[in-house]
Image (tube, rainbow, N blue to C red):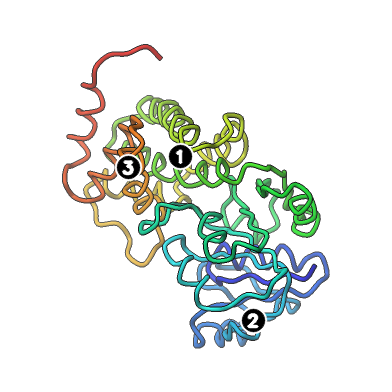
Amino acid sequence: MNVAVLGAGAFGSALAISLSAKGERVQLWGRNPKAMEQITQTREIFRLPDVRLPATVDVLSDLASVNADTLLLAVPMQTLSQLLTRQDFPSGVHLVACCKGIDLKSGMGPTGLIRQHYPDRIAAILTGPSFAADIARGLPTALTLACSNADAGTELQSVLTTETLRLYTSTDPKGAELGGALKNVIAIACGMVIGAGLGASARAALIARGYAEMQRFAQALGAEPQTLTGLSGFGDLVLTCTSSQSRNFAFGAALGAGEVPKAGTTVEGRATAGAALALAQTHQIDMPITAMVSAVCDGAIGVPQAMRRLMQRNLKAE
């Protein structure tokens, strides 16, 4: 299999760098021709300082020129549908989502959107605890490769595993993508707690209760219970909720500190909170943390008020 990465942001570029280390050429496409021309000339990625793009990565800005049988879709979740309709991808191509979230318009996750647009293609998702900078620098990272077709998943696992990127397969893409989506919401909440100076104990409580909320939501939507105990659920939750490298955590920390969050940064958890809350209300799933994150992100309430509402909920058994 030859591989192309669609999306030249930090994560897509990092994947291209890691895969090129196997000695095979990898295509990297980005939608901005000027930016891609600059990358071609400098071999530098703006969001990955001190990392150079290897010569074995072919930089492209024309989507029609992409020629690969495995496409890693590393674009923001809210632009994935647009990418899938922009080009008619050939039959037989494997489409692997590398984004996390829930589409605001359809309420679907990444693999759901892929199947909607291309019902006859193999759809998979690559997700788990990972920072782009770590992958690009060749630091050891483990991810989940989830595909309902077990044979295709095993084949993709072999193609996409590198010396420093270890993949575990799953046949539950629903659980894998929901784990990756919902942990961003909890990470925003944890960032709010730390930014507001509410303490490490409060963050630990949010991680634990947020994890219970993630499991409740995912199982109600058809995910397998054990999936969220793995890398794409618990593992990703721990990483994102405990590091300022996380864009979602940093966004929440800025809100908690009463600051204006940094502009121009993709924060998937913000849109996911609203999308997940809408689904939760439809399916009558109790999602108190998600509801508070959504309300704060929308400016309806502040962090202190959200904290009080969570602390004053009716007492219950764990």
- Give the farthest residue toward the front: 120
> Residue at point 68% right, 43% down?
171
Which SS class for mark 3? Answer: helix
| Amino acid marked by disc 1 | Cys
> Measuring 56% from the left and 40% from the top, which residue is drawn there?
175
Q: In this rendering, which labeled residue sits more in front, label 1 or label 3?
A: 3
What SS does tag 2 mark? strand
Q: Earlier in the sequence, mark 2 or mark 3?
A: 2
The residue drawn where x is 24% and y is 31% is: 307
Of the pair 17 and 50, the residue shown nearer to us: 17
Q: Position of residue 225 (x, y in %)?
A: 57, 29
Quickly name the residue at label 3.
277
**Marks 1 and 3, how far apart at CA:** 20 Å
The quadrant of the image that shows the C terminus is top left
**Residue lying at the far right of the rendered structure:** 23
C-alpha gap between disc 1 and disc 2: 33 Å
Where is residue 105 drawn, in percent x and y?
36, 59
Vertical placement of residue 130 versus 132, above or below: above
Disc 2 target residue: 59
Mark found first going from the N terminus, 1 or 2: 2
Does the CB distance between marks 1 and 3 fall below 8 Å? no
Residue 33 in the image, given as x and y percentages of width and height: 51, 87
Determine crowd level at label 2: few under 14, some 14-19, many 20+ residues with C-alpha closer than 10 A.
Answer: many
Q: Residue at x 41, y 31 (%)?
A: 213
Judge the density around disc 3: few (<14), some (14-19), many (≥20) Cα neighbours within 10 Å: many
The residue at which mark 1 appears reads as: 241
Q: Compute the Cα span from label 2 to label 3.
A: 39 Å
Percent x, y of residue 286: 33, 29
Element on which disc 1 rests: helix
> How many marks overall?
3
- In contact (CB < 8 Å): disc 2 and disc 3: no
